[in-house]
Amino acid sequence: KAGVTQTPRYLIKTRGQQVTLSCSPISGHRSVSWYQQTPGQGLQFLFEYFSETQRNKGNFPGRFSGRQFSNSRSEMNVSTLELGDSALYLCASSSTSALYNEQFFGPGTRLTVL
Amino acid sequence: DQQVKQNSPSLSVQEGRISILNCDYTNSMFDYFLWYKKYPAEGPTFLISISSIKDKNEDGRFTVFLNKSAKHLSLHIVPSQPGDSAVYFCAASAMGSGGSNYKLTFGKGTLLTVNP
């Protein structure tokens, strides 16, 4: 079974621009979560999507948004980029067949904002 | 407010010995705990988990212990191998409206180095 894939792997943008990151979950997984990893804050939850609906949201400004498509693929968008948005953005997918579900992570997209 | 804390940023052990990684949490609503391992340039890899109805879960060389009264969990790796060298993250989740067990709260990680 293929794992979680994220594109692109690396991205360089300048302040004020906007960016879209993509995530394809493991086949059959319908839940997709996004996390931001920075050296100072560690891994922080952004949001989670299930069946094209955002179910959970972390404490990030409205510049961070996402969506999920009918095939469970998800995109994350950051508008008006700031230097502090430089981070590794991780996507994780989960099966929904059990009460507790481990999340399986992709390799991440390294975003650098100049 | 950091709800999951890993107070040791790094840990160094000799090959063959036991590695013990610690994690504390403050949110009493957490009822499921996970450990992830992360190598550079890769996403975290799930290692082992434990539900709050248990106090121990074992999987091969990895054992997780949960002390709910102390809000503390630990990961034991026995015996430690050089390939175990990585950053280990503790994570927790709480059931809530909308199935919020999919929202994981992570600690900041502990870098484990296993020396040959």
Image (spheres, grey):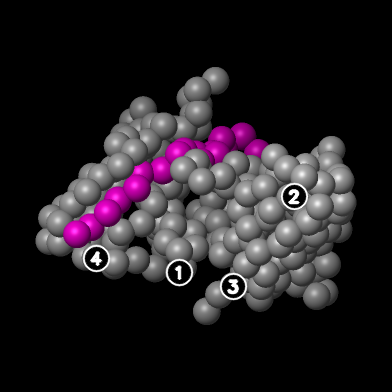
Q: Is residue A73 left or right of residue B92?
A: left
Q: List the residue tagged with mark 1.
A: A40
Q: Looking at the picture, which amino acid does disc 1 mark?
A: Gly
Q: Secondary structure at mark 3?
A: loop
**Disc 4 chain ID:** A
Report the span colored magenta: A91-114
Q: List the residue tagged with mark 2.
A: B115
How many other residues sit within 10 Å of disc 1, few (<14), some (14-19) or many (≥20)? few
Give the number of the disc on residue B3: 3
Percent position of residue B16, x then y: 86, 46
Q: Looking at the picture, which amino acid does disc 2 mark?
A: Asn
In the rendered image, the residue lying farthest to the left is: A16
Percent position of residue A28, x then y: 50, 26
**Disc 3 chain ID:** B
Q: CA distance from mark 1 to mark 2?
A: 27 Å
In the rendered image, the residue lying farthest to the bottom is: B1
Q: Is residue A44 left or right of residue A23?
A: right
How many other residues sit within 10 Å of disc 3, few (<14), some (14-19) or many (≥20)? some
